[in-house]
Image (spheres, grey):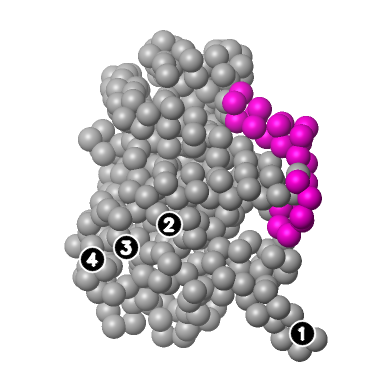
Amino acid sequence: MKTSDIRRDIPFLDEVIYLDAASTTPTPQPVVDAMCDYYHHYNSSTGRGAYKTAVKATSEVEKTRSILAEFINSRKEEIIFTKNTTEAINLVAHGFNFKKGDSLIVPNIEHHSNLVPWLNLKKKGVEINIIKSDSQGVVDPTKIDNAIDQNTKLISITHISNSIGSMQPVEEIGKIAKENDILYLVDAAQSVGHMSINIDKLNADFVAFPGHKGLLGPVGTGFLYAQKDVCNELEPVNLGGGTVSDVTEHDYKLTDGPARFEGGTLNISGLIGLGAAVDYIKRIGMDKIEKHGNKITKMMFEGINDIEDSRVYGNPEVIYDMVGFNINGVNCHDVAKILDEQNNICVRSGMHCAIPAIRQIGAYELGGTVRASIHYYNTKEEIKTLIDTLEDISQLGS
């Protein structure tokens, strides 16, 4: 599939230049069609219903579980449905029996969703060891290795920074975790759907994924990969229907596998749409998506960097599918607003739910950064329009 094919499937892209994929991506028509098919033809709850439409709904949701497992090279029973990456991370933070005196390692370049749940454990007496990245937003694995002690129970790190797009050496850190018999969680919110992910290479026990970003799936969908051998060490945090196999007046017995973590009615249409979205991504081809992303990101980085009054953050050699920047003398929110008003260009501005990361790169006093983030549907012409408009905006700060 070509970029033009994708754009035909997303009418929204005829109205705007959409450069906020790191927040969410627009949904292609085949994904919407799969969701509508559910509502129009078998709009039933999943689970133990014996009638045909309930059986079909259950089958389609489980089909998505299989699609996701194949996509990341895991087992089906290692896929736990969530509503987003944040919920997936919190499932581990709240479901694991961390105790007073335990120690966790987390870098300072994380999205708040991969920092605040761990900081919250300080209430239980858990020590949170914060590792600083370099000025380019990259974490040195040696710093993590040196921070490990006999009380370290888990290392958690983002794959790609949501604030400036810096890719972390997650495979190398995974090896360190494995050598020290420490649990390892990777936040893949900004990498899945943008690059190939193989669970075996990550050496991770847990990987948290969104459905609505790089995978082009519906909002309100996500999933947690939980390695089979450690999955049963997690306690469910959402008990209720579907999580138990037996209940008496005095006790209950949890069911096996991912179902124990998926209490209540799932986002059935969303999960069916997520399966359709991954099939759609596979039809494009991850190799083509990666190649296109590298080319467009390089063009965007170099073009913005060449503007006289710009400041671009991060090392272009390790930035993936987004560019964080500021225009000297113009507030980042004003830049975003002018881009929208002048040419319907959608970018994100501010702290990007990553305040410590913004401090680390020196943009906190500026109110944050402007972030332009892309996917396979973006074109060179759109990036040229962005750069030309930023050239005009830069004159306002002179």
Bounds of the magenta segment: 29-52
Q: Earlier in the sequence, mark 1 or mark 4?
A: 4
- Depth check, mark 3 against mark 4: the one in front is 4
Q: Which mark is residue 176?
A: 4
Residue identified by numbered label 2: 75
Circle 3 SS class: strand
Q: Residues within 10 Å of mark 2 (few under 14, many from 20)?
A: some
Mark 4 surroundings: few (<14), some (14-19) or many (≥20) residues within 10 A: many
**Pointer 3 local density, CA inside 10 Å: few below 14, some 14–19, many at least 20:** some
Residue that appears at 42% across and 25% down: 284
Mark 2 residue type: Arg
Is mark 3 in CB contact (under 8 Å) with mark 4? no
Q: Which residue is mark 3?
A: 131
Residue 261 occupies which quadrant of the picture? bottom right
| Residue 121 coordinates in the image, percent (x, y) | 51, 74
Q: Earlier in the sequence, mark 3 or mark 1?
A: 3
Looking at the image, is mark 3 or mark 4 earlier in the sequence? 3
Name the kind of residue labelled 1 in the image: Thr
Seen at 63% across and 76% down, the residue is 254
The residues tagged by marks 3 and 4 sit, at their Cα atoms, a distance apart of: 15 Å
Q: Quick one: which residue is furthest to the bottom in this view?
A: 250
Q: Amino acid at mark 4?
A: Ile
Question: In the shown orientation, is residue 321 left or right of residue 246?
Answer: left
Q: Residue at x 41, y 77 (%)?
A: 127
Give percent across and percent down for residue 62.
Answer: 58, 50
Q: Secondary structure at mark 1?
A: loop
Dot placed on the residue nearer the N-terminal end, 2 or 4: 2
Q: Is residue 42 magenta?
A: yes
Q: Secondary structure at mark 2?
A: loop
Q: Kindly tell me whether residue 278 is visible in this rendering.
A: yes
Label 2 with label 3: CB-CB less than 8 Å: no
| Residue picked out by circle 1 | 248
